[in-house]
Amino acid sequence: MERWSGRVALVTGASAGIGAAIAKVLMEAGMKVVGCARRIDKIEEFASEWDSLPGKLIPYKCDLESEQDIIDMFKWIADNKELGKVDVCINNAGMSTSETLLDGKYENWKKMMNINVIALCLCTKLSIESMQANNINDGHIVMISSMSGHRVPPSPATRFYSATKFAVNGLIEGWRQSVREIKSQIRISGLSPGLVETEFAEAMTKDKDKARKLYDSISCLQAVDMAESVKFILSAPPHVQIHDILVRPTEQVS
């Protein structure tokens, strides 16, 4: 990770869970990390708490459902004298509702597509444009997908979410081919976790007890496990592109 010291990373959904853990690991490697989310207050707390780490966390408020917010964020990074560019982009933000397909609502499907797929795609596009504009040929983009992008889970409540993650896995390969076509050495990688103990289940179900029951059912992955997986991806030598890491809890059945 030494070669990333002093360079700039963007982490979406950095206010909790996997995104926060990734931001911390990148700071430990000496990176300047732009952590974005709607809940900027949480990122500001982390920035203060982790102030002694070698890197720096720069909070930025961004609603990933808004195209203009995303465009403005990249312009702000480009115009910021301390930053100026994006060397690494971690597309971590994602969400789900607990509706079945039969009970699903149009506005919730649209929200999931906007955050899980379209925002991810736009952040990837703008990151590559930033890298090219700054002659960065060794940049890296990591998309946080899911085991639900490799098989439709048995839970009826996560099947549309699963469809968005199948889309993400298609985009990992689509973007990989796209950067090869422009003769760039920028790498595109994915990380597909199984059940990780974060705020995700509670946000999805709106039921703290139900979420706790799910996480207590097995020994879950932890956010730091996923952050270490991202560190492994970024540590690979230039001739090695890690395409997608699939990680399940040992006890997970599906």
Image: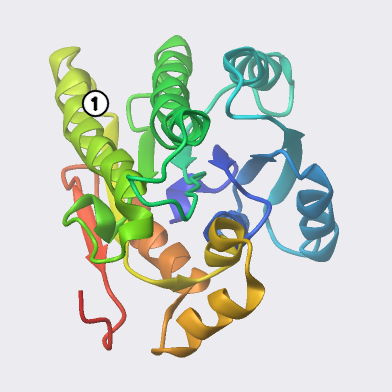
Please determine whether, in this image, residue 77 is positioned above or below residue 6.
above
Q: Position of residue 95 (x, y in %)?
A: 50, 47
Number of other residues with Cα within 10 Å of mark 1, as a class: few under 14, some 14 to 19, many 20 or more = some
The residue at the point 29 percent across, 38 percent down is 168
Secondary structure under tag 1 reads helix
What residue is drawn where x is 39% and y is 89%?
Answer: 218
Relative to 5, residue 193 above or below? below
Quarter holding residue 233: bottom left
What percent of the width, then of the height, locates residue 164?
32, 39
Asked which quadrant contains residue 196, the reply is bottom left
Amino acid type, mark 1: Trp
Which of these two is toward me, 71 or 113? Answer: 113
The residue where tag 1 is placed is: 175
Image quarter hosting the N terminus: bottom left
Q: Is residue 139 left or right of residue 79?
A: left
User: Residue at position x 74%, y 41% from top?
Assistant: 58
